Image (spheres, rainbow, N blue to C red):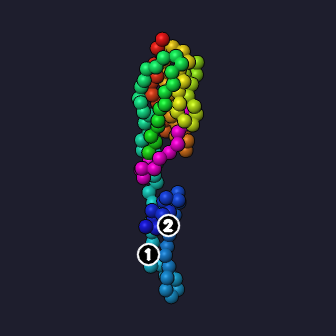
Amino acid sequence: MLRSALTSLGIVGLTVVIACGPGNEPLAAVPPPAECTISETTVSPASATVHPGDTLRVTATISDCRDGRHQARWTSSDTTVATVTVDAGSIHAMKTGRVSIIATAVDNSAEKAAMALDVNP
């Protein structure tokens, strides 16, 4: 229970010694929790086709080994074709073309996932 409480607070790499009795000899030690990294990043839908002027909402799922959820920042590979709100994943199609809409984990910029967006006339 102590380990899960410390882990939920983001405290990792810490050894807790509980001491009691004469001389404060250790009665129990809790090893540090294992490092937890992002295990999966996905974008839904994985692809879509829209028309200029259309809007579309996409979602990112960024999970870690504890099934924690992380926030995403959104970008477009070509903002002349489609724009996306940085925090919300709301896409606005601007003109005909193909673009990647990319979700990047806020707390780990190496973790990314993308969806393909075709904007047809």
Q: Quadrant of the N terminus?
A: bottom left
Residue at 45 percent of width and 64 percent of height = 3
Question: To which residue does mark 1 refer?
Answer: 28
Above/below status of 38 relative to 75: below
Q: Specify the farthest residue to the front.
A: 54
Question: To which residue does mark 2 refer?
Answer: 15
Spot occupied by residue 115 in the image (x, y as percentages of width and height): 45, 28
Residue 65 visible from this viewpoint: yes
Residue at 43 percent of width and 36 percent of height = 42
SS at mark 2 in the image? loop
Q: Which mark is residue 41?
A: none
Q: Magenta stretch containing residue 72, yes or no?
A: yes
Crowding at dot 2, Cα within 10 Å, few <14 / some 14-19 / many 20+, comes out as: few
Above/below status of 17 relative to 66: below
Q: Which amino acid does label 2 sit on?
A: Thr
Residue closest to the eye, 31 or 86:
86
Q: Magenta stretch containing residue 4, yes or no?
A: no
Residue at 57 percent of width and 31 percent of height = 85
Residue closest to the eye, 57 or 61:
57
Above/below status of 42 relative to 2: above
